[in-house]
Image (cartoon, grey):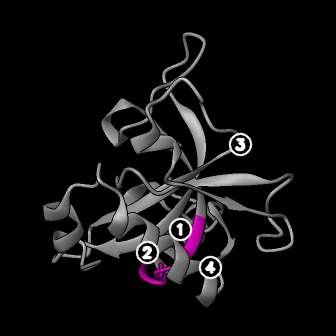
Amino acid sequence: MTKIGDLLGDLVDDIARDAISIGDVHMLVLDKTNGITPKDGENTRDKFFVVLGFDKEGNVIGGVVINSNINNNLPTTITDYQLPITVEQCPFLKHKSYVNCSRLMIAERTKFSSTTFRGEMGAELMEQIVETVKESPTMNKKMLKDFGII
């Protein structure tokens, strides 16, 4: 038997998925299929996901993730495209972090819900993120076009 609470929860999640906008930040459970390397034998990682664009059908969302630290063992083509952000800019953060502008991640719309939303990036910060993404030599230009970023 279906409970009213379950129906309302599903409806709220559907509304939240329909309301996803560029610049929104969601806490998503990501894995290798999204381009994330899980740590310490885990299968997934929770990551802040910044929405940058949508595919033509609107079902797949392209974005970048926020990291707590920069892995200095990576090549400069990656480390040079980590945009620092502060708690003052993004109150949902607990400490200074970095937007990884070197790689576009993909997430299905179904990963998003009413409980994953954490906040939104301001217009000035979003402009910096998008410009840094466009400048990154590791960025897949076809993906940027597919998601309407360029």
Relative to 126, residue 85 above or below: above
> Can residue 124 be seen in this snapshot?
yes
Answer with the quarter of the image where residue 62 lies. Answer: bottom left
Of the residues under marks 3 and 4, which one precedes in the sequence? 3
Q: Is residue 82 magenta?
A: no
Relative to 95, residue 12 above or below: below
132 displayed left or right of 73: left
Q: Label 2 is placed on what type of residue?
A: Val
What whole-number distance in Å separates the C-alpha atoms at marks 1 and 2?
37 Å
- The residue pinned by badge 1 equals 7
Image spot of residue 142 (x, y percent): 13, 63
- The residue pinned by badge 4 equals 125
Count neighbours of disc 2 (C-alpha within 10 A) and say few if under 14, some if 14 to 19, many if 20 or more.
some
Verify CB contact (< 8 Å) between mark 2 and mark 3: no
Of the residues under marks 2 and 3, which one precedes in the sequence? 3
- The residue pinned by badge 2 equals 130
